[in-house]
Amino acid sequence: MKKNKIALLPGDGIGPEIIEQAVKCLNAIGKIYEIEFEFSYGYIGATAINKYGNPYPSETDQLCRDSDAILFGAIGDPKYDNNPKSKIRPEQGLLKMRKDLGLFANIRPLKIHPSLYDSSPLKREIINNVDLIIVRELTSGIYFGKPSATEENGMEAYDTCRYTSTEIERVAKIALDLAMKRRKKVTLVDKANVLETSRLWRSVVTKIKEESYSQIDLEYMFVDNAAMQLVSNPSKFDIILTENMFGDILSDISGVLSGSIGTLPSASLGEKHKLFEPIHGSYPEAAGKNIANPVATILSAAMMLRELKYNDAANHLELACYNTIQNGVVTPDLKIDKHSKNNSFTTEDVGNEIVKEITKRT
């Protein structure tokens, strides 16, 4: 039996709690489908700074390189967030990991299961039939721009946004390939009326589409309009392709549609390495309280299974998650039955219920 080496990076805040539940569910699904996992833990973010003085130490980097996949929890700590003079920050570890491992394409699916309709702040007729994927470039743009600095007087700062045609091409091909398996529609989101980098995106993506993806319906949309359309007419989208910062913002907007970003998974893919993580942050206020929603992390584990070619196991795990929500076993961020006073369960309760659903449907 092949042993799947999985690097576990719990990170900060609620990260350890949600990773614990994902591991529990992976072990349960592994028994059914005879999938063997070898889990190894690593440090990243504030926990890594505390131990190594480095948010992404070489030990963690090597662990990730030696693994078949990486399952990541969350990153961020108020100790650093609230100190503008801090030179080392937890988020630097995540950015460095993405860059060093070449994780250039972030895949964020949003398919709203009927069991989540009542938890959304939007009307049912708006979120009905929403099934979209945001493909975000992850290792370039303004988050990695050089130069970037604050002037010595502290009264002026600047960041630069830079893209090359090669960086755009490789993520565009992933989006276009995904679209070919779906509705054959890609929306390129940019700010081409203002930004030179956005005009380069339009030029490069248009050329690739015309040369190799003639069947694809490619449309262009400014990011401000895309933000409005995501909350007013989200079902119009199939694949959204965009640059780093715009993708960061739009994917968090999309999280509102499902009622909680605690239900949304993601994958970050490179040529050699693959990382899977919930789209939410470290939620430090909830750390240690056993109230964080583990579903996004467990669904990220399902995406990992699919990428490792265990499609049946991935489908089984996803179904177990949605059945658990349908059963009303949810953490406080989700309110499925608005009239019930007993609809808030712990992180551990939800993980245990998903395991029960897994074993129930063998």
Image (cartoon, helix red, strand yellow):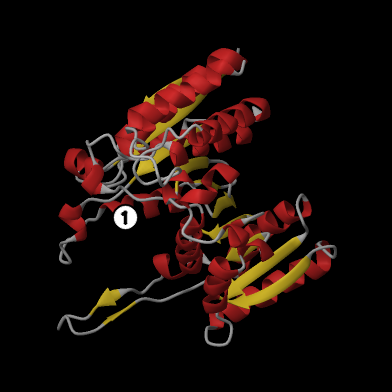
> Would you call the spot at circle 1 few (<14 residues within 10 Å), some (14-19), or many (20 or more)?
some
Q: Can you tell which quarter of the image residue 308 is in?
A: top right
Camera-nearest residue between 122 and 322: 122
> Residue placed at 39% from the left, 55% from the top?
95
Q: On the rendered image, what quadrant is the N terminus found in?
A: top right
> Residue placed at 54% from the left, 50% from the top?
117
Residue identified by numbered label 1: 92
Q: Is residue 59 something one can see in this rendering? A: no
Q: On the rendered image, what quadrant is the C terminus found in?
A: top right
Camera-nearest residue between 360 and 206: 360
Q: Amino acid at mark 1?
A: Gln
Local SS, label 1: helix
Name above or below for residue 174 compared with residue 211.
above
Name above or below for residue 70 compared with residue 284.
above
Residue that extends furthest to the right in the rendered view of this protein: 215
Tell me where residue 137 appears, x and y as whole percent.
54, 60
Tell me where residue 92 appears, x and y as whole percent.
31, 55
Tell me where residue 154 appears, x and y as whole percent.
16, 80
Q: Is residue 339 something one can see in this rendering? A: yes
Name above or below for residue 174 compared with residue 203.
above
Camera-nearest residue between 273 and 344: 344
